[in-house]
Amino acid sequence: MARIAGREVPNNKAAWIGLTYVYGIGRHSALKIVETAKIEKSKKIGELSEEELNRIREEIDASFKVEGDLRTERSMNIKRLIDIGSYRGLRHKKRLPVRGQRTRTNARSWKGARANAIKKK
């Protein structure tokens, strides 16, 4: 298994699909990385030479924020919203939907399982 951006990438996947295993790299970004590194996108990760892997690593380091740095940035953005007391921050704090979804019905993944007041036999 090749190690890219601190993450093990499976050898049996195509180069651009394998890159999507790294947090912060989706399909579009993966295609762009493979293209700028001048690697055939259908080539498997296990078939890549060490020099080609290094080109991919350099491209990711130069152009993208991935894994731990990205997770830290996202959590700091949410913490900032909570600290300033914005509406979005309050919604995060209460563990409710943030982007305007209805909560009268639905929102079960946020609110948790229903609390049944009276259980029928």
Image: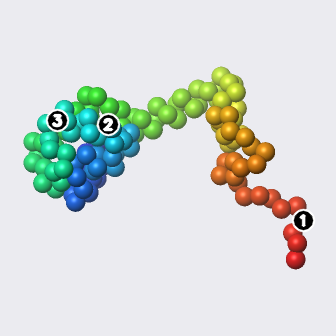
Residue found at x 66% / y 30%: 88
**Which amino acid lies under the numbered mark 2 shown in the image of this protein?**
Ser
* Occupied quadrant, residue 29: top left
Q: Residues within 10 Å of mark 1 (few under 14, many from 20)?
A: few
Circle 2: element type: helix
Q: Disc 2 or 3, which lies upstream in sequence?
A: 2
- Give the mark nearest the N terminus, 3 or 1: 3
Q: How many marks?
A: 3
Nearest to viewer (mark 1 / mark 2) = 2
Residue shown at 42% from the left, 35% from the top:
70
Q: Secondary structure at mark 3?
A: loop
Residue at (29% x, 40% y) in the render: 30
- Locate residue 116 relative to residue 103 in the image: left or right: right
Q: What residue is shown at x 68% (from left), y 34% (from top)?
A: 100
Q: Amino acid at mark 3?
A: Ala
Disc marking residue 29: 2
Give the residue pinned by disc 1.
Answer: 118
Amino acid type, residue under disc 1 in the picture: Ile
